[in-house]
Image (spheres, rainbow, N blue to C red):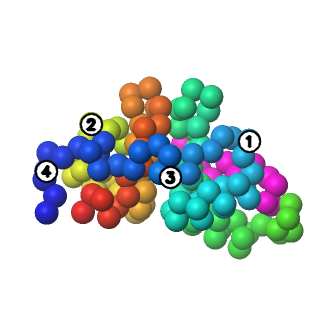
Amino acid sequence: MMSNNQTVSEKMLGLGKFPVLSAKDTLKRALDEMTKHRLGIACFTNESNELIGILTDGDLRRLLLTRQSPLPALLVTPAIEFGHSSPTSIQGEQSLTEAAALMHDKQIWDLPVVDSSKKLLGLIHRHDVN
């Protein structure tokens, strides 16, 4: 049973436990990292470790269904081009209850955790907030 006062930062995956890429990283690299970490999301950060985008399994499905480019061309394209440049995120001091409500409202499974200056701190998964 979840405690109502438990914070997101207490349950989140820390850096190194999920894919974090730069804007220059290719779709192939993103796929490799998502597969390695067994997660359906990759986060993108800038040089200051600020969250600048995400790519999800859903984005990849939509990409394959809508793009007419050959797969080899897609694999060398920067992965961030296929994702979201202003993703939903949550701050680490917010409660797990707030995270669960946000995930439910947005119908998402993973939520990047940031500090007040948008620096990426971690990732919270829907199973960890229920």
For label 4, the SS is: loop
Mark 1, Cα crowd under 10 Å, few <14 / some 14-19 / many 20+, is some
Q: Inspect the magenta stretch and tell me whether residue 79 lies in it.
A: yes
Marker disc for residue 18: 3
> Disc 3 on helix, strand or loop?
loop
Question: How far is mark 4 from mark 1, CA to CA?
Answer: 40 Å
Segment colored magenta: 74-86
Q: Which residue is mark 4?
A: 4
Tag nearer the camera, 2 or 3: 3
Among numbered discs 4 and 1, the one appearing first in the sequence? 4
Q: Are marks 4 and 1 in contact (CB under 8 Å)?
A: no
Q: Three-letter amino acid code at disc 2?
A: Glu
Q: Position of residue 108 (x, y in %)?
A: 42, 60
- Residue 89 lies, with reference to residue 47, above or below; the image says below
For the residues labelled 1 and 3, the Cα–Cα distance comes to 18 Å
Q: Residue at image x 78%, y 66%?
A: 67
Residue under label 2, please give it.
93
Return the disc, 1 or 3, that comes first in the chain's sequence: 3
Q: Which residue is mark 1?
A: 24
User: In what element is the residue under mark 1?
Assistant: loop
The residue drawn where x is 34% and y is 38% is 91
